[in-house]
Image: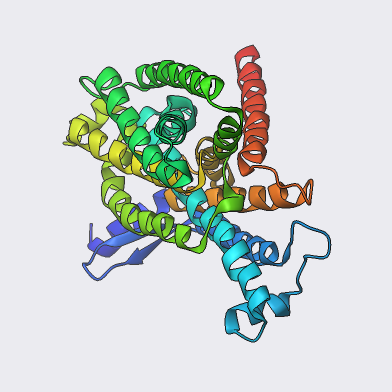
Amino acid sequence: MTTSSRDHTELEIWPPRFRFVSTRGGGRLRVDLRTVLVTVVLLVVTAAVSVWSLTIGSAEGANLPLDRVVGAFTGSESDMIQRIVVEGRLPRVAVAVFGGACLALSGAIFQTVTRNPLGSPDIIGFTSGANTGALVAMLVLNLGYAGATIGSLVGGLLTGVVIYLLAMRGGIEGTRLIVVGIGVSAMLVAFNGFLLARAKVENAVSAAAWGQGIFSQLKFEDILPVAVALLLLAPALAVLAPGMRMFELGPDSARSKGVDTERLQLLLLLVAVGFVAIVTAVAGPVAFIALIAPQVAMRLSRSPGIPLVTSAAVGATLLVISDVIARSLLAPVQLPVGVVTTALGGVYLLGLLIAQSRKASV
C-alpha cells in the first residue's frame, strides 16, 4: 500500500469533525473542528463580558458608556475616569479571566490523572490549605493582606506535599487520592474555623471575607502574578500533556506505553498546585471553577477526554461572569465572587447527583 493510500485509509477512520494539518517536520496535527469552534465561541463570550464588565459600576450612576471606557485607556478621559476603569475595574476583570483559566487547567489535570470528575483542588484540599496559610499569616502572625498572599502560597504548596506523601505511594490511585484529600480538607476546614473563632471580631470578619474571594480589593499589580503563572505553567503543561493523556486509560496502561508514571505524576501535581496556589494567593479561595470547567468543556466539545484549551476558556468565561454577578446582583453591595461560584458549584453537584442516580436506575 502506498503512503498516500495508507494516509487516505487512516483519515477515513476518523469522524468528519477531525481534520489533519501537515507540520514542518513531516508529521500531521489532528484538529477537532468542534472543539476549536466551541473554544472560539467561549473566547468571544469572555471578551464581550469582560468589556461589558468594564462599563458596569457597583453604585447607582457609576455605569460608563463604552466610548468613555475606551477613552480611559487612550488617555482622552479625566484622571478620575482612568482610575475608575484602569485601577478599579480592570484588575478584577483581568484576574477573573487569567485566574479562571488557571483554575480550570488545575482541575483538568487532577480529573484526567485521577479519572474522576470530583478530582479538583476544591475537593482534594489544596484550596483549603491555601486558605489555612492565609489565615495563619493574618490572624496568628498579624501580617495583614500582604502576608496572606505569601501565606496562601506556602499553605497550598505544603498541602500538596502532605497529600502526595499520604496518597501517592506507588503512584496515583484516583479514589485514594480523593479520599485522602477530602480527609485533609476536612481537618483544614476545622482548623480554619478554630482560627476564626479565636480571633478578634474585626480580624475574623476581614479574614472570612478574604476566604470568599477578594476581587473588590485587587490592584493593578495583582494582574502580573496570575498572568505570569499562566504564561509559565501552561507551556509546561503542554509539554506534559501527551504523557498525561495516557492516564485516561489508567496508570497501568500508561506504564505499558513507556511512561514514567511516578515522575510524571509529581510534575503534574506541581503544575496543578502552582496554578491554584497563585490564584488563591492573589484573589483568595475561589471555589468550584476547577471542578466545573473541565467537565463543562468536555460536554460542550463532546470530547472523549478533557480538552485543556477549551477547559481554560470555560474557566475564564465562568469566573468573569461570576464577577459581574457578584458586583451587580445586590449593588451597591458587592458580593464575594466565591459566593457566586459556590452557588454554581452547588447546582453542578446537584445535577451530577441526579444524572448518576438516573444511570444507576437504568
Q: Position of residue 46 (x, y in %)?
A: 60, 59
Q: Position of residue 244 (x, y in %)?
A: 30, 40
Give the residue at the far bottom of this rendering.
Answer: 76
Q: Nearer the viewer, residue 299 or 190?
A: 190
Position of 11 with respect to 294 (left or right) is: left
Position of residue 339 relative to residue 99, above or below, is above
Q: Nearer the viewer, residue 319 or 280?
A: 280
For residue 258, which quarter of the picture?
A: top left
Give the residue at the far right of this rendering.
Answer: 60
Q: Position of residue 4 (x, y in %)?
A: 28, 64
Q: Nearer the viewer, residue 64 or 218?
A: 218
Position of 89 with respect to 298 (left or right) is: right
Position of 131 with respect to 41 (left or right) is: left
Count of number-bearing discs: 0
For residue 152, which quarter of the picture?
A: top left
Q: Is residue 37 visible?
A: no
Image quadrant for the N terminus?
bottom left
Name the residue at 38% across, 38% down: 151
Name the residue at 26% across, 52% down: 239
Position of residue 303 relative to residue 360, above or below, is below
Q: Is residue 334 visible?
A: yes
Name the residue at 30% across, 31% down: 158
Q: Position of residue 187 (x, y in %)?
A: 44, 16
Image quadrant for the C terminus?
top right
Position of residue 65 relative to residue 206, above or below, is below
Position of residue 55 relative to residue 9, above or below, is below
Q: How is this picture coloured?
A: rainbow
